[in-house]
Image (cartoon, rainbow, N blue to C red):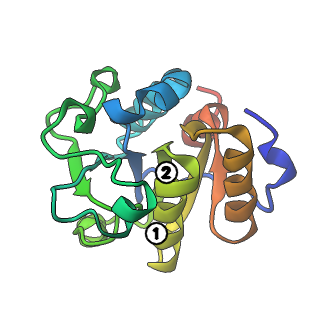
């Protein structure tokens, strides 16, 4: 659970009727980062499925031509489309009906139809999980907020390269962008004492 409570400004539970779960970039490329949170991530996915909350996966990858600033920033170390590294981790238990949004930058909203698809589904709130906390998860959460979605950010089903970066994101998001959830709070918020 970590020390996120010291950053938390306000509490709220997601509304299962208007929520969607975003599972950000849990791909083979990031498996070393994702494995420690996998039990919490799978529990979060199961809780959302049980509450009839749609589960949407994002998959970050590049073609040779679309690296842009990310290619510069990461010295050309990009996840190339069509490689095993670009595939979602098989442990995710993705269902055939689950949406997968392809993206090539930190935000799941940039140059995708995610916002429109969420609106078409009647989604007003997003629950953000996945990797990396301080890059794709945070950028997606911030952009969701500025696009008018209520944001819930998982503290125990997100991960990054080190705890300090993870906590910095939590502190920033709690200040102005997101409500926090973890597996325990999500279960209680969606199902009470059931």
- In the image, 69 versus 42, the foreground residue is 69
Tag 1's secondary structure? helix
Residue at 79 percent of width and 55 percent of height: 8
CA distance for labels 2 and 1? 10 Å
* Residue 44 placement (x, y as % from top left): 49, 33
159 relative position to 28: left or right: right
Tag 2's secondary structure? strand
29 relative position to 42: left or right: left
The residue pinned by badge 1 equals 144
Tell me, for residue 128, which label it has, or none: 2
* Residue 94 placement (x, y as % from top left): 25, 31
Q: Is residue 92 above or below residue 105?
A: above
- In the image, 64 versus 55, the foreground residue is 64
- N-term-proximal mark, 2 vs 1: 2
Residue at 37 percent of width and 69 percent of height: 69
For the C terminus, the image quarter is top right
Using the rendered image of the protein, determine whether residue 37 is visible from the camera's viewpoint: yes
* Residue 125 placement (x, y as % from top left): 47, 62
- In the image, 159 versus 161, the foreground residue is 161
């Amino acid at each position: 659970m970590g020390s996120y409570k010291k950053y938390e400004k306000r509490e709220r539970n997601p509304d299962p009727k208007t929520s969607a779960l975003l599972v950000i970039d849990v791909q083979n490329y990031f498996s070393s980062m994702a494995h420690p949170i996998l039990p919490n991530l799978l529990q979060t996915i199961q809780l959302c499925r049980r509450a009839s909350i749609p589960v949407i996966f994002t998959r970050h990858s590049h073609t040779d031509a679309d690296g842009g600033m990310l290619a510069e920033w990461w010295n050309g170390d990009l996840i190339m489309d069509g490689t095993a590294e670009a595939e979602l981790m098989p442990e995710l238990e993705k269902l055939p009906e689950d949406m997968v949004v392809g993206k090539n930058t930190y935000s799941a909203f940039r140059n995708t139809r995610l916002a429109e698809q969420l609106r078409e589904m009647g989604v007003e709130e997003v629950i953000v999980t996945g990797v990396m906390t301080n890059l794709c998860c945070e950028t997606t959460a911030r952009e969701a907020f500025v696009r008018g979605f209520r944001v819930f950010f998982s503290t125990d089903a997100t991960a990054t390269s080190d705890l300090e970066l993870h906590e910095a994101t939590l502190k920033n998001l709690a200040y102005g962008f997101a409500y926090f959830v973890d597996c325990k709070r999500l279960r209680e918020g969606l199902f009470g004492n059931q």
